[in-house]
Image (tube, rainbow, N blue to C red):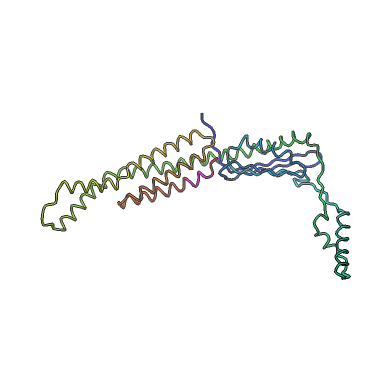
Amino acid sequence: MTQSLHSMTGFGRYEEPWEGRTLSIEIRGVNHRYTDVRVRLPNGWGQMEQVIRTLVQEQVGRGRVEVNIRWGSEGYQVVTPRLDHDVVQRYLAIYQELSDMLGQNAPTPDINQLLHMPGIIITDTPEVALDQLEKPLLRIAQQALTPFVEMRSQEGQNLKGVLGEQLETLERHLQQLERRIPEVPKEHHNRLKERLDKWELPKEVDPARLEQELAFQAERCDISEEVARVQSHIQQFQTLLQQGGVIGRRLDFLCQELHREGNTMGAKSQDRQVSQTLIALKATIDKLREQVQNIE
């Protein structure tokens, strides 16, 4: 069954009036190896965190998603600062006690000093009945999730096109290698015979021994098995792209295998043309893997 391909990058935002203030939500998605949903809520709304996380996880297969919810005027959380008189009196009492203990008649701390003391200022947020909060909160969350998921889907389709083009480039490199592979032993045979002629050996070289040496060199430099495996990985890659869904980690694994085969071919190759093609092939694999990091 074919499914949509999604990027892990996305953004969605929605707000609406609720209880005399603006209830707003922003959802941002970035790349991550696993699913990591982080929810920020106004003070006192912690019981809603799992509800929002579950809603997001139903529509997100992989990636880091940050959900930021505010309730306030124009999207900013409403807070009411107030002075804690008891804490102020305790600080002053401690200050006086320390002054007496040290026998110093120091001046009373000024207002700026007191305002920087922990606990002097308390910020209260409006209280909300949590049983009345879940329904509107889920509604705006779904409204923000809709453009978020749509953006991820659109980015996924764009990535699918880019990856398809890169796979076609890989196949062209493989075709160049396949055309070149049969020619390498022949050219190596001719070069070896030319060198033997230049050496002016005193006696005839054993033809069987020469053919054995040529076969050994051809076997050592043969990359046809690696080419076949790369072609198989490309076919698996194309199948996964058509299948869609949460395939990013599987695509990343295939990119690792492609990179490994490219390194093996590079180590075996002693032909200049093959080496040049392999450089281009490995560069394409690197581009492929870079794009795969964005796939869900």
> Is residue 56 left or right of 135 when viewed as pictured?
left
Give the vertical position of 60 relative to 102 (above or below): above
Rendered residue at 89%/70% (across/down): 105
Residue furthest out toward the bottom? 104
Residue furthest out toward the front? 101
Residue 290 falls inside the magenta stretch: yes
Q: Which residues are magenta?
A: 289-293
Rendered residue at 54%/44% (across/down): 294
* Dominant secondary structure (helix, strand or loop) of the stretch shown in magenta: helix
Q: Decide which of 128, 104 is in the foreground and name it.
A: 104
Q: Decide which of 208, 152 is in the foreground and name it.
A: 208
> Is residue 108 left or right of 146 when viewed as pictured?
right
Image location (x, y in percent) of residue 121:
83, 54
Residue furthest out toward the left? 203
Q: Decide which of 192, 28 is in the foreground and name it.
A: 192
Q: How many marks?
A: 0
Rendered residue at 45%/34% (across/down): 239
Image location (x, y in percent) of residue 251:
48, 40
Q: Decide which of 149, 209 is in the foreground and name it.
A: 209
Image location (x, y in percent) of residue 167:
43, 41
> Is residue 64 left or right of 76 when viewed as pictured?
left
> Is residue 162 left or right of 171 when viewed as pictured?
right
Q: On the rendered image, what quadrant is the C terminus found in?
A: top right
Residue 126 falls inside the magenta stretch: no
